[in-house]
Image (spheres, helix red, strand yellow):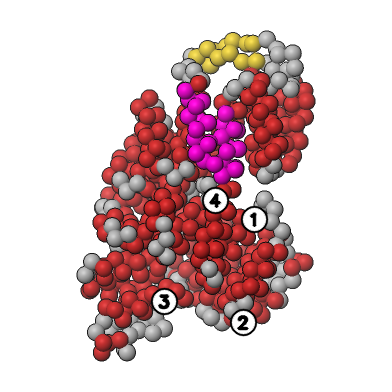
Protein backbone atom coordinates (compact mmCIF):
# COMPACT_ATOMS: atom_id res chain seq x y z
CA UNK A 1 0.00 0.00 0.00
CA UNK A 2 0.99 3.53 -0.62
CA UNK A 3 0.08 5.28 2.62
CA UNK A 4 1.46 8.20 4.54
CA UNK A 5 4.00 6.04 6.34
CA UNK A 6 4.93 3.96 3.32
CA UNK A 7 4.94 6.92 0.96
CA UNK A 8 7.48 8.74 3.00
CA UNK A 9 9.65 5.75 3.83
CA UNK A 10 12.14 6.98 1.27
CA UNK A 11 12.04 10.46 2.79
CA UNK A 12 12.50 9.07 6.28
CA UNK A 13 15.45 6.98 5.17
CA UNK A 14 16.94 10.00 3.47
CA UNK A 15 16.49 11.98 6.68
CA UNK A 16 18.14 9.18 8.63
CA UNK A 17 21.07 9.17 6.24
CA UNK A 18 21.42 12.90 6.81
CA UNK A 19 20.79 12.80 10.54
CA UNK A 20 22.84 9.77 11.42
CA UNK A 21 26.26 11.12 10.44
CA UNK A 22 25.39 14.16 12.53
CA UNK A 23 24.33 11.82 15.32
CA UNK A 24 27.62 10.05 15.06
CA UNK A 25 29.41 13.35 15.22
CA UNK A 26 27.37 14.49 18.17
CA UNK A 27 28.02 11.26 20.03
CA UNK A 28 30.93 11.56 22.46
CA UNK A 29 33.31 8.92 23.69
CA UNK A 30 33.48 7.82 27.31
CA UNK A 31 35.49 10.90 28.16
CA UNK A 32 33.07 13.27 26.35
CA UNK A 33 35.24 14.73 23.64
CA UNK A 34 35.37 18.47 23.15
CA UNK A 35 32.62 20.18 21.21
CA UNK A 36 33.20 21.49 17.71
CA UNK A 37 31.48 24.56 16.27
CA UNK A 38 30.96 24.90 12.54
CA UNK A 39 28.65 26.56 10.02
CA UNK A 40 26.22 24.37 8.04
CA UNK A 41 23.85 26.00 5.52
CA UNK A 42 24.38 29.34 7.18
CA UNK A 43 23.59 28.04 10.69
CA UNK A 44 26.00 27.54 13.56
CA UNK A 45 26.05 23.87 14.57
CA UNK A 46 27.67 22.51 17.71
CA UNK A 47 28.63 18.84 17.53
CA UNK A 48 30.80 16.34 19.36
CA UNK A 49 33.50 14.23 17.84
CA UNK A 50 33.24 10.46 17.82
CA UNK A 51 35.81 7.71 18.11
CA UNK A 52 36.75 6.26 14.70
CA UNK A 53 35.95 2.70 15.78
CA UNK A 54 32.48 3.66 17.03
CA UNK A 55 31.82 5.49 13.77
CA UNK A 56 32.92 2.44 11.77
CA UNK A 57 30.44 0.15 13.57
CA UNK A 58 27.63 2.72 13.46
CA UNK A 59 28.11 3.24 9.74
CA UNK A 60 27.99 -0.51 9.19
CA UNK A 61 24.81 -0.70 11.27
CA UNK A 62 23.20 1.89 9.00
CA UNK A 63 23.94 -0.27 5.98
CA UNK A 64 22.35 -3.25 7.69
CA UNK A 65 19.28 -1.09 8.47
CA UNK A 66 18.95 -0.23 4.78
CA UNK A 67 18.80 -3.97 4.06
CA UNK A 68 16.50 -4.60 7.06
CA UNK A 69 19.06 -6.93 8.59
CA UNK A 70 18.14 -5.95 12.10
CA UNK A 71 20.04 -8.64 13.97
CA UNK A 72 23.31 -7.54 12.39
CA UNK A 73 22.42 -3.88 12.96
CA UNK A 74 21.90 -4.54 16.68
CA UNK A 75 25.26 -6.29 16.91
CA UNK A 76 27.03 -3.34 15.26
CA UNK A 77 25.29 -0.76 17.43
CA UNK A 78 26.30 -2.70 20.55
CA UNK A 79 29.92 -2.67 19.36
CA UNK A 80 29.63 1.06 18.65
CA UNK A 81 28.38 1.75 22.18
CA UNK A 82 31.26 -0.30 23.56
CA UNK A 83 33.63 2.25 22.04
CA UNK A 84 31.42 5.27 22.77
CA UNK A 85 29.21 4.52 25.75
CA UNK A 86 28.24 8.15 26.31
CA UNK A 87 26.54 8.72 22.97
CA UNK A 88 22.79 9.16 23.54
CA UNK A 89 22.10 8.89 19.81
CA UNK A 90 23.81 5.51 19.49
CA UNK A 91 21.75 4.07 22.32
CA UNK A 92 18.59 5.48 20.69
CA UNK A 93 19.45 3.89 17.34
CA UNK A 94 20.14 0.60 19.12
CA UNK A 95 16.67 0.81 20.65
CA UNK A 96 15.05 1.36 17.25
CA UNK A 97 16.79 -1.72 15.83
CA UNK A 98 15.71 -3.78 18.85
CA UNK A 99 12.09 -2.79 18.31
CA UNK A 100 12.28 -4.15 14.78
CA UNK A 101 13.27 -7.48 16.36
CA UNK A 102 10.32 -7.30 18.79
CA UNK A 103 12.58 -6.96 21.84
CA UNK A 104 10.88 -4.11 23.72
CA UNK A 105 12.46 -4.79 27.12
CA UNK A 106 15.96 -4.42 25.73
CA UNK A 107 14.82 -1.37 23.76
CA UNK A 108 13.54 0.20 26.98
CA UNK A 109 16.98 -0.25 28.60
CA UNK A 110 18.68 1.41 25.61
CA UNK A 111 16.18 4.30 25.62
CA UNK A 112 16.59 4.86 29.37
CA UNK A 113 20.35 4.92 28.89
CA UNK A 114 20.06 7.39 26.00
CA UNK A 115 17.80 9.81 27.88
CA UNK A 116 19.87 9.54 31.06
CA UNK A 117 22.99 10.68 29.22
CA UNK A 118 21.18 13.58 27.54
CA UNK A 119 17.67 14.08 26.11
CA UNK A 120 17.93 14.17 22.33
CA UNK A 121 15.52 14.07 19.43
CA UNK A 122 16.60 10.52 18.59
CA UNK A 123 15.99 9.43 22.18
CA UNK A 124 12.55 11.01 22.36
CA UNK A 125 11.49 9.55 19.01
CA UNK A 126 12.71 6.10 20.09
CA UNK A 127 10.68 6.45 23.31
CA UNK A 128 7.61 7.32 21.25
CA UNK A 129 8.18 4.31 18.99
CA UNK A 130 8.34 2.08 22.06
CA UNK A 131 4.89 3.36 23.07
CA UNK A 132 3.64 2.53 19.56
CA UNK A 133 5.17 -0.92 19.75
CA UNK A 134 3.22 -1.50 22.95
CA UNK A 135 -0.03 -0.40 21.34
CA UNK A 136 -0.09 2.99 23.04
CA UNK A 137 -0.23 5.70 20.35
CA UNK A 138 -1.70 8.18 22.83
CA UNK A 139 1.41 7.74 24.96
CA UNK A 140 3.58 8.27 21.89
CA UNK A 141 1.77 11.49 21.00
CA UNK A 142 2.12 12.69 24.60
CA UNK A 143 5.89 12.03 24.68
CA UNK A 144 6.37 13.90 21.41
CA UNK A 145 4.15 16.79 22.51
CA UNK A 146 6.12 17.13 25.75
CA UNK A 147 9.35 17.20 23.73
CA UNK A 148 8.08 20.10 21.63
CA UNK A 149 7.46 22.04 24.83
CA UNK A 150 10.68 21.01 26.55
CA UNK A 151 13.23 21.33 23.76
CA UNK A 152 14.34 24.67 22.36
CA UNK A 153 13.98 23.89 18.68
CA UNK A 154 13.89 27.43 17.37
CA UNK A 155 17.34 26.98 15.81
CA UNK A 156 16.78 23.40 14.68
CA UNK A 157 13.99 23.46 12.14
CA UNK A 158 14.63 19.89 10.95
CA UNK A 159 14.37 18.48 14.47
CA UNK A 160 11.13 20.40 15.07
CA UNK A 161 9.76 19.10 11.77
CA UNK A 162 10.69 15.54 12.60
CA UNK A 163 9.12 15.54 16.07
CA UNK A 164 5.95 17.29 14.90
CA UNK A 165 5.43 14.90 11.99
CA UNK A 166 5.97 11.95 14.32
CA UNK A 167 3.42 13.45 16.69
CA UNK A 168 0.84 13.89 13.95
CA UNK A 169 1.32 10.30 12.83
CA UNK A 170 0.89 9.11 16.42
CA UNK A 171 -2.31 11.14 16.73
CA UNK A 172 -3.66 9.46 13.61
CA UNK A 173 -2.82 6.06 15.10
CA UNK A 174 -4.55 7.17 18.31
CA UNK A 175 -7.66 7.77 16.14
CA UNK A 176 -7.64 11.51 16.85
CA UNK A 177 -7.52 12.86 13.33
CA UNK A 178 -8.75 16.28 14.38
CA UNK A 179 -5.76 16.63 16.72
CA UNK A 180 -3.44 15.51 13.91
CA UNK A 181 -5.02 18.11 11.65
CA UNK A 182 -4.38 20.84 14.23
CA UNK A 183 -0.79 19.70 14.75
CA UNK A 184 -0.07 19.78 11.03
CA UNK A 185 -1.87 23.09 10.58
CA UNK A 186 0.30 24.68 13.28
CA UNK A 187 3.41 23.34 11.59
CA UNK A 188 2.32 24.67 8.21
CA UNK A 189 2.14 28.16 9.67
CA UNK A 190 5.90 28.08 10.15
CA UNK A 191 6.79 25.62 7.36
CA UNK A 192 4.24 26.37 4.60
CA UNK A 193 6.33 24.67 1.92
CA UNK A 194 7.24 21.49 3.82
CA UNK A 195 6.30 18.73 1.38
CA UNK A 196 5.85 15.96 3.94
CA UNK A 197 3.52 18.15 5.98
CA UNK A 198 1.41 19.11 2.97
CA UNK A 199 1.08 15.45 1.97
CA UNK A 200 0.02 14.36 5.43
CA UNK A 201 -2.44 17.21 5.80
CA UNK A 202 -3.99 16.39 2.42
CA UNK A 203 -4.41 12.77 3.51
CA UNK A 204 -5.94 13.71 6.87
CA UNK A 205 -8.32 16.21 5.21
CA UNK A 206 -9.43 13.54 2.75
CA UNK A 207 -10.15 11.12 5.59
CA UNK A 208 -12.13 13.83 7.42
CA UNK A 209 -14.29 14.35 4.30
CA UNK A 210 -12.91 17.81 3.48
CA UNK A 211 -12.11 17.01 -0.13
CA UNK A 212 -11.80 20.66 -1.14
CA UNK A 213 -9.09 21.22 1.45
CA UNK A 214 -7.33 18.00 0.48
CA UNK A 215 -7.28 19.17 -3.13
CA UNK A 216 -5.80 22.51 -2.09
CA UNK A 217 -2.93 20.85 -0.20
CA UNK A 218 -2.14 18.44 -3.04
CA UNK A 219 -2.18 21.31 -5.54
CA UNK A 220 0.15 23.35 -3.34
CA UNK A 221 2.47 20.37 -3.02
CA UNK A 222 2.79 19.80 -6.77
CA UNK A 223 3.26 23.52 -7.28
CA UNK A 224 6.23 23.43 -4.88
CA UNK A 225 7.56 20.13 -6.26
CA UNK A 226 6.30 19.59 -9.82
CA UNK A 227 7.92 16.16 -10.01
CA UNK A 228 6.17 14.78 -6.90
CA UNK A 229 4.56 12.00 -8.91
CA UNK A 230 2.64 10.35 -6.08
CA UNK A 231 1.00 13.64 -5.12
CA UNK A 232 -0.01 14.23 -8.73
CA UNK A 233 -1.57 10.78 -9.04
CA UNK A 234 -3.42 11.15 -5.76
CA UNK A 235 -4.66 14.55 -6.90
CA UNK A 236 -5.96 12.93 -10.09
CA UNK A 237 -7.72 10.26 -8.05
CA UNK A 238 -9.16 12.84 -5.65
CA UNK A 239 -10.51 14.89 -8.55
CA UNK A 240 -12.14 11.72 -9.90
CA UNK A 241 -13.78 11.14 -6.52
CA UNK A 242 -15.03 14.74 -6.63
CA UNK A 243 -16.43 14.14 -10.14
CA UNK A 244 -14.14 16.83 -11.55
CA UNK A 245 -13.34 14.72 -14.59
CA UNK A 246 -11.75 17.33 -16.86
CA UNK A 247 -9.40 18.41 -14.08
CA UNK A 248 -8.68 14.76 -13.24
CA UNK A 249 -7.77 14.04 -16.85
CA UNK A 250 -5.42 17.01 -16.94
CA UNK A 251 -3.76 15.75 -13.76
CA UNK A 252 -3.24 12.31 -15.30
CA UNK A 253 -1.82 13.81 -18.49
CA UNK A 254 0.65 15.89 -16.49
CA UNK A 255 1.57 12.85 -14.37
CA UNK A 256 2.26 10.79 -17.48
CA UNK A 257 4.42 13.56 -18.93
CA UNK A 258 6.35 14.00 -15.68
CA UNK A 259 6.93 10.25 -15.45
CA UNK A 260 8.35 10.21 -19.00
CA UNK A 261 5.86 7.62 -20.15
CA UNK A 262 6.04 5.25 -17.19
CA UNK A 263 3.92 2.20 -18.00
CA UNK A 264 2.35 2.02 -14.54
CA UNK A 265 1.22 5.65 -14.72
CA UNK A 266 -0.05 5.01 -18.24
CA UNK A 267 -2.10 2.08 -16.93
CA UNK A 268 -3.72 4.28 -14.29
CA UNK A 269 -4.55 6.88 -16.93
CA UNK A 270 -5.93 4.28 -19.35
CA UNK A 271 -8.11 2.85 -16.59
CA UNK A 272 -9.47 6.34 -15.89
CA UNK A 273 -10.26 6.87 -19.58
CA UNK A 274 -12.09 3.57 -19.85
CA UNK A 275 -14.10 4.42 -16.76
CA UNK A 276 -15.21 7.56 -18.61
CA UNK A 277 -16.14 5.37 -21.61
CA UNK A 278 -13.35 6.94 -23.67
CA UNK A 279 -12.19 3.64 -25.16
CA UNK A 280 -10.44 5.16 -28.19
CA UNK A 281 -8.45 7.53 -26.00
CA UNK A 282 -7.41 4.64 -23.74
CA UNK A 283 -6.26 2.70 -26.80
CA UNK A 284 -4.28 5.72 -27.97
CA UNK A 285 -2.41 5.87 -24.66
CA UNK A 286 -1.38 2.23 -25.09
CA UNK A 287 -0.44 2.74 -28.74
CA UNK A 288 1.76 5.73 -27.91
CA UNK A 289 3.83 3.70 -25.46
CA UNK A 290 4.90 0.69 -27.48
CA UNK A 291 7.88 -1.03 -25.85
CA UNK A 292 10.01 -3.53 -27.72
CA UNK A 293 11.77 -4.95 -24.67
CA UNK A 294 10.63 -8.41 -23.67
CA UNK A 295 12.14 -8.77 -20.20
CA UNK A 296 9.50 -10.09 -17.78
CA UNK A 297 9.19 -6.91 -15.71
CA UNK A 298 8.62 -4.65 -18.71
CA UNK A 299 6.37 -7.23 -20.31
CA UNK A 300 4.12 -7.43 -17.25
CA UNK A 301 3.81 -3.63 -17.13
CA UNK A 302 3.02 -3.59 -20.84
CA UNK A 303 0.41 -6.32 -20.40
CA UNK A 304 -1.23 -4.40 -17.57
CA UNK A 305 -1.39 -1.30 -19.79
CA UNK A 306 -3.13 -3.25 -22.55
CA UNK A 307 -5.57 -4.74 -20.06
CA UNK A 308 -6.23 -1.31 -18.52
CA UNK A 309 -6.91 0.02 -22.02
CA UNK A 310 -9.57 -2.66 -22.46
CA UNK A 311 -7.53 -4.80 -24.85
CA UNK A 312 -7.12 -8.05 -22.97
CA UNK A 313 -6.45 -10.01 -26.21
CA UNK A 314 -3.46 -7.75 -26.86
CA UNK A 315 -2.17 -8.41 -23.36
CA UNK A 316 -2.49 -12.15 -23.85
CA UNK A 317 -0.81 -11.94 -27.27
CA UNK A 318 2.18 -10.21 -25.67
CA UNK A 319 2.55 -13.06 -23.21
CA UNK A 320 2.10 -15.69 -25.91
CA UNK A 321 4.74 -14.04 -28.10
CA UNK A 322 7.32 -14.32 -25.33
CA UNK A 323 6.28 -17.89 -24.51
CA UNK A 324 6.77 -18.80 -28.20
CA UNK A 325 10.47 -17.95 -27.89
CA UNK A 326 10.94 -20.89 -25.47
CA UNK A 327 12.30 -18.80 -22.56
CA UNK A 328 13.96 -20.42 -19.57
CA UNK A 329 11.74 -21.89 -16.85
CA UNK A 330 11.76 -18.86 -14.54
CA UNK A 331 10.92 -16.35 -17.27
CA UNK A 332 8.22 -18.71 -18.53
CA UNK A 333 6.81 -18.96 -15.01
CA UNK A 334 6.71 -15.19 -14.52
CA UNK A 335 5.07 -14.62 -17.90
CA UNK A 336 2.42 -17.25 -17.21
CA UNK A 337 1.80 -15.70 -13.79
CA UNK A 338 1.28 -12.31 -15.47
CA UNK A 339 -1.00 -13.89 -18.07
CA UNK A 340 -3.11 -15.55 -15.38
CA UNK A 341 -3.25 -12.32 -13.39
CA UNK A 342 -4.58 -10.45 -16.43
CA UNK A 343 -7.29 -13.05 -16.91
CA UNK A 344 -8.17 -12.99 -13.22
CA UNK A 345 -8.42 -9.19 -13.20
CA UNK A 346 -10.76 -9.45 -16.18
CA UNK A 347 -13.04 -11.85 -14.26
CA UNK A 348 -12.15 -14.83 -16.47
CA UNK A 349 -11.40 -17.08 -13.52
CA UNK A 350 -11.58 -20.46 -15.27
CA UNK A 351 -9.01 -19.41 -17.86
CA UNK A 352 -6.86 -17.86 -15.13
CA UNK A 353 -6.82 -21.18 -13.26
CA UNK A 354 -5.79 -23.03 -16.40
CA UNK A 355 -2.93 -20.59 -17.00
CA UNK A 356 -1.68 -20.72 -13.41
CA UNK A 357 -1.67 -24.51 -13.57
CA UNK A 358 0.67 -24.54 -16.60
CA UNK A 359 3.54 -22.86 -14.73
CA UNK A 360 6.47 -25.33 -14.74
CA UNK A 361 7.08 -27.13 -11.47
CA UNK A 362 10.75 -26.10 -11.42
CA UNK A 363 9.94 -22.40 -11.97
CA UNK A 364 10.22 -19.90 -9.11
CA UNK A 365 6.59 -18.83 -9.68
CA UNK A 366 5.23 -22.39 -9.45
CA UNK A 367 4.00 -22.28 -5.85
CA UNK A 368 2.43 -18.84 -6.18
CA UNK A 369 0.61 -19.95 -9.31
CA UNK A 370 -0.75 -23.04 -7.57
CA UNK A 371 -1.91 -20.99 -4.58
CA UNK A 372 -3.63 -18.47 -6.86
CA UNK A 373 -5.38 -21.27 -8.75
CA UNK A 374 -6.52 -22.93 -5.53
CA UNK A 375 -7.89 -19.63 -4.20
CA UNK A 376 -9.94 -19.05 -7.36
CA UNK A 377 -11.31 -22.59 -7.24
CA UNK A 378 -12.20 -22.24 -3.56
CA UNK A 379 -14.02 -18.96 -4.20
CA UNK A 380 -15.94 -20.66 -7.02
CA UNK A 381 -17.01 -23.45 -4.66
CA UNK A 382 -14.85 -26.09 -6.40
CA UNK A 383 -13.43 -27.36 -3.14
CA UNK A 384 -12.19 -30.87 -4.15
CA UNK A 385 -10.15 -29.39 -7.01
CA UNK A 386 -8.68 -26.76 -4.71
CA UNK A 387 -7.80 -29.39 -2.12
CA UNK A 388 -6.05 -31.56 -4.71
CA UNK A 389 -3.80 -28.64 -5.68
CA UNK A 390 -2.90 -27.75 -2.11
CA UNK A 391 -2.21 -31.35 -1.07
CA UNK A 392 0.23 -31.70 -3.96
CA UNK A 393 2.42 -28.87 -2.67
CA UNK A 394 5.18 -30.35 -0.51
CA UNK A 395 6.12 -28.06 2.36
CA UNK A 396 9.73 -29.20 2.40
CA UNK A 397 10.24 -27.51 -0.96
CA UNK A 398 8.90 -24.13 0.19
CA UNK A 399 10.58 -21.16 1.74
CA UNK A 400 9.19 -19.82 5.02
CA UNK A 401 6.97 -17.19 3.42
CA UNK A 402 5.36 -19.59 0.95
CA UNK A 403 4.93 -22.25 3.61
CA UNK A 404 2.97 -19.72 5.64
CA UNK A 405 0.78 -18.85 2.64
CA UNK A 406 0.12 -22.55 2.06
CA UNK A 407 -0.92 -22.95 5.70
CA UNK A 408 -3.33 -20.03 5.36
CA UNK A 409 -4.75 -21.44 2.12
CA UNK A 410 -5.31 -24.84 3.70
CA UNK A 411 -7.01 -23.29 6.71
CA UNK A 412 -9.39 -21.29 4.53
CA UNK A 413 -10.20 -24.40 2.53
CA UNK A 414 -10.91 -26.36 5.72
CA UNK A 415 -13.28 -23.65 6.87
CA UNK A 416 -15.00 -23.72 3.46
CA UNK A 417 -15.56 -27.44 4.00
CA UNK A 418 -17.30 -26.77 7.33
CA UNK A 419 -14.24 -27.77 9.39
CA UNK A 420 -13.90 -24.49 11.26
CA UNK A 421 -12.27 -26.03 14.34
CA UNK A 422 -9.67 -27.77 12.22
CA UNK A 423 -8.92 -24.53 10.39
CA UNK A 424 -8.54 -22.68 13.68
CA UNK A 425 -6.21 -25.34 15.04
CA UNK A 426 -4.05 -25.28 11.90
CA UNK A 427 -3.46 -21.54 12.26
CA UNK A 428 -2.95 -21.72 16.01
CA UNK A 429 -0.25 -24.36 15.58
CA UNK A 430 1.73 -22.17 13.20
CA UNK A 431 4.81 -20.61 14.92
CA UNK A 432 4.02 -16.96 15.59
CA UNK A 433 7.32 -15.12 15.41
CA UNK A 434 7.58 -11.41 14.74
CA UNK A 435 7.79 -11.92 10.98
CA UNK A 436 4.55 -13.83 10.46
CA UNK A 437 2.23 -13.42 13.44
CA UNK A 438 0.24 -10.51 11.99
CA UNK A 439 -0.31 -12.43 8.76
CA UNK A 440 -1.52 -15.45 10.73
CA UNK A 441 -3.73 -13.38 13.00
CA UNK A 442 -5.37 -11.50 10.14
CA UNK A 443 -5.89 -14.77 8.27
CA UNK A 444 -7.61 -16.18 11.36
CA UNK A 445 -9.72 -13.02 11.60
CA UNK A 446 -10.76 -13.34 7.96
CA UNK A 447 -11.64 -16.98 8.54
CA UNK A 448 -13.85 -16.05 11.48
CA UNK A 449 -15.56 -13.30 9.53
CA UNK A 450 -16.44 -15.63 6.66
CA UNK A 451 -17.24 -18.84 8.51
CA UNK A 452 -17.27 -18.31 12.25
CA UNK A 453 -17.73 -15.66 14.92
CA UNK A 454 -17.55 -12.03 13.83
CA UNK A 455 -16.86 -10.90 17.40
CA UNK A 456 -13.88 -13.23 17.51
CA UNK A 457 -12.76 -11.77 14.18
CA UNK A 458 -12.77 -8.30 15.73
CA UNK A 459 -10.78 -9.50 18.74
CA UNK A 460 -8.15 -11.01 16.48
CA UNK A 461 -7.83 -7.81 14.47
CA UNK A 462 -7.56 -5.95 17.76
CA UNK A 463 -4.51 -8.06 18.64
CA UNK A 464 -2.75 -6.86 15.49
CA UNK A 465 -3.61 -3.24 16.24
CA UNK A 466 -2.21 -3.56 19.75
CA UNK A 467 1.13 -4.49 18.18
CA UNK A 468 0.92 -2.06 15.27
CA UNK A 469 -1.63 0.77 15.48
CA UNK A 470 -0.74 1.78 11.91
CA UNK A 471 -1.60 -1.60 10.37
CA UNK A 472 -3.90 -0.37 7.61
CA UNK A 473 -5.30 -3.79 6.71
CA UNK A 474 -6.28 -4.48 10.33
CA UNK A 475 -7.80 -1.00 10.77
CA UNK A 476 -9.92 -1.36 7.65
CA UNK A 477 -10.87 -4.97 8.42
CA UNK A 478 -12.05 -4.14 11.93
CA UNK A 479 -14.01 -1.13 10.72
CA UNK A 480 -15.72 -3.00 7.90
CA UNK A 481 -16.70 -6.05 9.94
CA UNK A 482 -18.03 -3.79 12.70
CA UNK A 483 -20.05 -1.83 10.13
CA UNK A 484 -21.52 -5.01 8.66
CA UNK A 485 -22.72 -5.98 12.15
CA UNK A 486 -23.82 -2.45 13.17
CA UNK A 487 -21.31 -2.74 16.01
CA UNK A 488 -19.74 0.33 17.64
CA UNK A 489 -20.07 2.51 14.55
CA UNK A 490 -18.30 5.55 16.11
CA UNK A 491 -15.14 3.50 16.72
CA UNK A 492 -15.48 1.84 13.32
CA UNK A 493 -15.57 5.26 11.66
CA UNK A 494 -12.47 6.45 13.51
CA UNK A 495 -10.53 3.36 12.52
CA UNK A 496 -11.60 3.60 8.90
CA UNK A 497 -10.67 7.28 8.82
CA UNK A 498 -7.25 6.48 10.29
CA UNK A 499 -6.75 3.80 7.63
CA UNK A 500 -7.66 6.28 4.89
CA UNK A 501 -5.29 8.90 6.31
CA UNK A 502 -2.50 6.31 6.24
CA UNK A 503 -3.47 5.06 2.76
CA UNK A 504 -5.09 7.99 0.93
CA UNK A 505 -6.91 7.19 -2.27
CA UNK A 506 -7.75 3.57 -1.44
CA UNK A 507 -11.09 2.68 -2.98
CA UNK A 508 -11.56 -0.18 -0.51
CA UNK A 509 -11.09 2.08 2.50
CA UNK A 510 -13.27 4.81 1.01
CA UNK A 511 -15.93 2.15 0.58
CA UNK A 512 -15.59 1.21 4.26
CA UNK A 513 -15.92 4.84 5.37
CA UNK A 514 -18.96 5.29 3.15
CA UNK A 515 -20.54 2.03 4.32
CA UNK A 516 -20.21 3.08 7.95
CA UNK A 517 -21.94 6.37 7.15
CA UNK A 518 -24.60 4.36 5.29
CA UNK A 519 -25.19 2.09 8.29
CA UNK A 520 -25.49 5.17 10.51
CA UNK A 521 -27.91 6.80 8.04
CA UNK A 522 -25.64 9.77 7.29
CA UNK A 523 -26.68 9.81 3.66
CA UNK A 524 -24.72 12.83 2.41
CA UNK A 525 -21.35 11.54 3.58
CA UNK A 526 -22.27 8.01 2.56
CA UNK A 527 -22.94 9.32 -0.93
CA UNK A 528 -19.66 11.24 -1.03
CA UNK A 529 -17.52 8.23 -0.15
CA UNK A 530 -19.47 5.40 -1.81
CA UNK A 531 -19.97 7.17 -5.13
CA UNK A 532 -16.35 8.33 -4.98
CA UNK A 533 -15.15 4.76 -4.40
CA UNK A 534 -17.28 3.55 -7.32
CA UNK A 535 -15.80 6.21 -9.61
CA UNK A 536 -12.26 4.99 -9.01
CA UNK A 537 -13.10 1.26 -8.76
CA UNK A 538 -16.17 0.64 -10.96
CA UNK A 539 -15.26 -3.03 -11.41
CA UNK A 540 -15.55 -3.96 -7.72
CA UNK A 541 -18.89 -5.75 -7.15
CA UNK A 542 -18.98 -5.10 -3.40
CA UNK A 543 -18.56 -1.35 -3.86
CA UNK A 544 -21.30 -1.34 -6.50
CA UNK A 545 -23.52 -3.32 -4.13
CA UNK A 546 -23.06 -0.69 -1.45
CA UNK A 547 -23.86 2.12 -3.88
CA UNK A 548 -26.97 0.23 -4.98
CA UNK A 549 -28.06 -0.16 -1.36
CA UNK A 550 -27.52 3.57 -0.83
CA UNK A 551 -29.68 4.43 -3.84
CA UNK A 552 -32.36 2.02 -2.67
CA UNK A 553 -32.41 3.63 0.77
CA UNK A 554 -32.80 7.04 -0.86
CA UNK A 555 -35.66 5.85 -3.07
CA UNK A 556 -33.62 6.01 -6.30
CA UNK A 557 -34.83 2.63 -7.54
CA UNK A 558 -33.75 2.94 -11.18
CA UNK A 559 -30.20 3.90 -10.22
CA UNK A 560 -30.10 1.10 -7.67
CA UNK A 561 -31.16 -1.48 -10.28
CA UNK A 562 -28.50 -0.21 -12.68
CA UNK A 563 -25.79 -0.68 -10.07
CA UNK A 564 -27.09 -4.14 -9.17
CA UNK A 565 -26.95 -5.12 -12.84
CA UNK A 566 -23.39 -3.81 -13.19
CA UNK A 567 -22.31 -5.71 -10.10
CA UNK A 568 -23.92 -9.01 -11.16
CA UNK A 569 -22.30 -8.78 -14.59
CA UNK A 570 -18.95 -8.97 -12.79
CA UNK A 571 -19.92 -12.44 -11.50
CA UNK A 572 -19.40 -11.94 -7.77
CA UNK A 573 -19.37 -14.92 -5.44
CA UNK A 574 -20.20 -15.67 -1.83
CA UNK A 575 -21.68 -13.09 0.47
CA UNK A 576 -21.57 -10.27 -2.09
CA UNK A 577 -23.64 -12.23 -4.58
CA UNK A 578 -26.16 -13.13 -1.89
CA UNK A 579 -26.48 -9.48 -0.87
CA UNK A 580 -27.04 -8.42 -4.47
CA UNK A 581 -29.72 -11.07 -5.04
CA UNK A 582 -31.54 -10.04 -1.85
CA UNK A 583 -31.37 -6.40 -2.92
CA UNK A 584 -32.64 -7.30 -6.38
CA UNK A 585 -35.68 -9.05 -4.93
CA UNK A 586 -36.49 -5.96 -2.87
CA UNK A 587 -36.25 -3.70 -5.90
CA UNK A 588 -38.10 -5.67 -8.59
CA UNK A 589 -41.81 -6.49 -8.90
CA UNK A 590 -42.93 -9.93 -7.75
CA UNK A 591 -43.40 -11.19 -11.31
CA UNK A 592 -39.77 -10.35 -12.11
CA UNK A 593 -38.29 -12.00 -9.05
CA UNK A 594 -38.55 -15.51 -10.42
CA UNK A 595 -36.81 -14.27 -13.56
CA UNK A 596 -34.07 -12.46 -11.70
CA UNK A 597 -30.52 -12.90 -12.91
CA UNK A 598 -28.59 -15.98 -11.93
CA UNK A 599 -24.98 -16.88 -12.67
CA UNK A 600 -24.23 -13.31 -13.68
CA UNK A 601 -27.19 -12.75 -16.05
CA UNK A 602 -28.34 -9.17 -16.44
CA UNK A 603 -31.60 -7.72 -15.27
CA UNK A 604 -34.41 -7.91 -17.85
- Give residue 293's position: percent from left, percent from top: 55, 58
Residue at the image point whose x is 74% and y is 27% from the top: 80
Give the magenta range.
124-149
The residue mark sitting in front, 4 or 2, is 4
Q: Is residue 340 visible?
A: no
Q: Is residue 283 above or below residue 375?
A: above
User: What residue is pinned by disc 2?
Assistant: 385
- The reply to whether callout 4 and callout 1 are in contact (CB within 8 Å) is no
The mark that comes first in sequence, 1 or 2, is: 2
* Quadrant location, the C terminus: bottom left
Pointer 4: residues within 10 angstroms few (<14), some, or many (20+)?
many
Q: Nearer the viewer, residue 362 or 40?
A: 40
The foreground one among 217 and 151 is 151
Q: Which residue is mark 4?
A: 465
Label 3 belongs to which residue? Answer: 577
- Residue to which mark 1 is pinned: 437
Circles 4 and 2, Cβ within 8 Å, touching? The answer is: no
Nearer to the camera, 214 or 363 = 214
Alpha-carbon distance for marks 2 and 3?
22 Å
Of the two numbered discs 3 and 1 in the rendering, the one whose residue sits closer to the viewer: 1
Amino acid sequence: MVGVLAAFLGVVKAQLRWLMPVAMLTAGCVHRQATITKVVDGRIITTRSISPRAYEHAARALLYEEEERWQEAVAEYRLATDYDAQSPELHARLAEALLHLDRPKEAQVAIDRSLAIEPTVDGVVAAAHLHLHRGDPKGAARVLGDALLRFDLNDDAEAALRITLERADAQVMALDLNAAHRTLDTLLQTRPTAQAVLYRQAAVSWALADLVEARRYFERLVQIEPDHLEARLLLARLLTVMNQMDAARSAYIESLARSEGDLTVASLYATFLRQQELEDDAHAVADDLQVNETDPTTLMSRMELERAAGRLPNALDLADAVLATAPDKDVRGRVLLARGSALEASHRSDEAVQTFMTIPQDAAAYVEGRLRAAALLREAGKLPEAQTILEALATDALDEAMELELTVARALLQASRKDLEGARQRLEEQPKDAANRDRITLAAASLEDKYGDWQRALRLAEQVLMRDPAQVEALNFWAFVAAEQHHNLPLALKRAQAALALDPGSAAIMDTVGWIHHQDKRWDKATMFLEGAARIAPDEPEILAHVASLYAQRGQTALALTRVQQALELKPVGKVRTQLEVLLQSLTPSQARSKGPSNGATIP
